[in-house]
Image (cartoon, grey):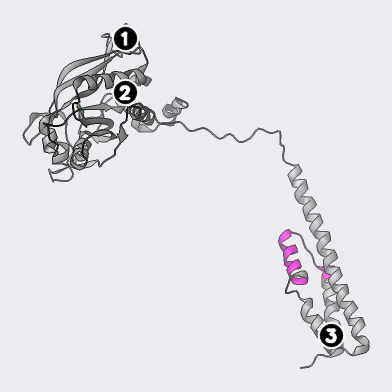
Amino acid sequence: MESTIQDIFNKPKTLLEEIASVEINDAGSLEQFRIRFLGTKNILKPLFGEIRNVPNERKKEYGQLLNEVKQAAEAKFNDLQSTFQQKEGEKADDIDVTAPGIPMPLGARHPINLVRNKIIEIFNKLGFTVTYDREIEDDWHNFTALNMPEDHTARDMQDTFFIQTNPDVVLRTHTSSVQVRVMESQEPPIRILSPGRVYRNETISARAHCFFHQVEGLYIDKDVSFGDLKQTLFFFAQEMFGPDTQIKLRPSYFPFTEPSAEVDVSCFICNSKGCNVCKYTGWVEILGCGMVDPAVLENCGIDSNVYSGYAFGMGVERIAMLKYQINDIRLLSENDIRFLSQFKGA
Ligand code: DAH
């Protein structure tokens, strides 16, 4: 149906009234207004198209009317926009830039990580690289290949968690299992450090836990001697506990090393004068070590006539407890923030 001239002229007039009376109280409504009157698909566009239906003598009048609408919309928009901007500015003025900021508490590193990272850093300097391996092991890698056949009494030293009822699947009792995996899969020279979690079926107390962390070290090459082992551990002890630290090797027994030793360091708490950390002996035990037993090399496919090597294993909790004088191992796995936050910057 053709619009009458009256209709055509009425539309912009209604819009003018709308512009004059519309209530805009927030930036969202102002944007709606802008889209309706000033956007690319604004409401005036089709009205401009109507000009062809207006008789010639009134075209000018109609055009002026539309321009009036457009100008009114622009004026209203600009006016409201600056009002809103001003309000935002006033809000910003409310911010007290001299007020103290919201504090961001600094995290702390876990003492187990601190010690493990330090051990890795020290042995990195000697060319040891880090190898991780699985915590669920088979009997071969955790025991048999390490010279502990099924009925070997040494298995009793490490109360084992078995997975379900399958005696072949265990939670590893030590990181020495990684030695076997590495020797089976790599050609010497081998120089690795293997940190990780281990599990033993122990009653939890201040001194023992059913899971803890170890770092295993292994060096296999031609002509590796006990002297190399001793010098390496001496370097480690001084880097870890201070330049005046002395070490002492006591003969010991491990099924996978021959000869075997336990290493004590001079007590860095009391300077060997005697305290309850060293139980008034002046020495504290930190690790087990030895020359890899030729039978272990052979089990892993390494010719024991050509190669020799040393291995060592240390408990991370034990070293952390000594270093930070922590008297209960349970603190290291309880995640009490009051305890852990003390290691900020340690
Ligand atoms: N696996 C031993 C343990 O858990 C520690 C150990 C001792 C590792 C002597 C070694 C070693 O590599 O040579 O008690």
In the image: residue 335, left or right of residue 36? left
Q: Amino acid at mark 1?
A: Cys
Q: Which residue is mark 2?
A: 319
Mark 1 neighbour density, 10 Å: few (under 14) some (14–19) many (20 or more): some
Residue closer to the observer: 25 or 270: 270
Task: Answer above or below: position of 56 versus 312.
Answer: below
Q: Which mark is residue 51?
A: 3
In the image, farthest residue toward the left = 151
Question: Residue 93 at what x, y percent from top left?
Answer: 76, 42
For image coordinates 31% across by 20% down, the residue present is: 235
Among numbered discs 3 and 1, the one appearing first in the sequence: 3
Q: Amino acid at mark 3?
A: Ile
Q: Secondary structure at mark 2?
A: helix
28 inside magenta stretch: yes
Q: Amino acid at mark 2?
A: Ile
Residue closer to the observer: 238 or 330: 238
Q: Secondary structure at mark 3?
A: helix
In the image: residue 121, left or right of residue 205? right
In the image, farthest residue toward the top = 273
Mark 3 or mark 1, whichever is nearer to me: 3
Mark 3 neighbour density, 10 Å: few (under 14) some (14–19) many (20 or more): some
Q: Secondary structure at mark 1?
A: loop
Residue 146 can be seen in this image: no
Ligand 1 lies in which image quarter? top left
Q: Which residue is mark 1?
A: 275
The C terminus lies in quadrant: top left
In which quadrant of the rendered view does residue 248 lie? top left
Q: Are marks 3 and 2 in contact (CB under 8 Å)?
A: no
For image coordinates 32% across by 6% down, the residue present is: 273
> What segment is highlighted magenta in the picture?
19-37
Question: Residue 180 at what x, y percent from top left?
Answer: 18, 37
Mark 2 or mark 1, whichever is nearer to me: 2
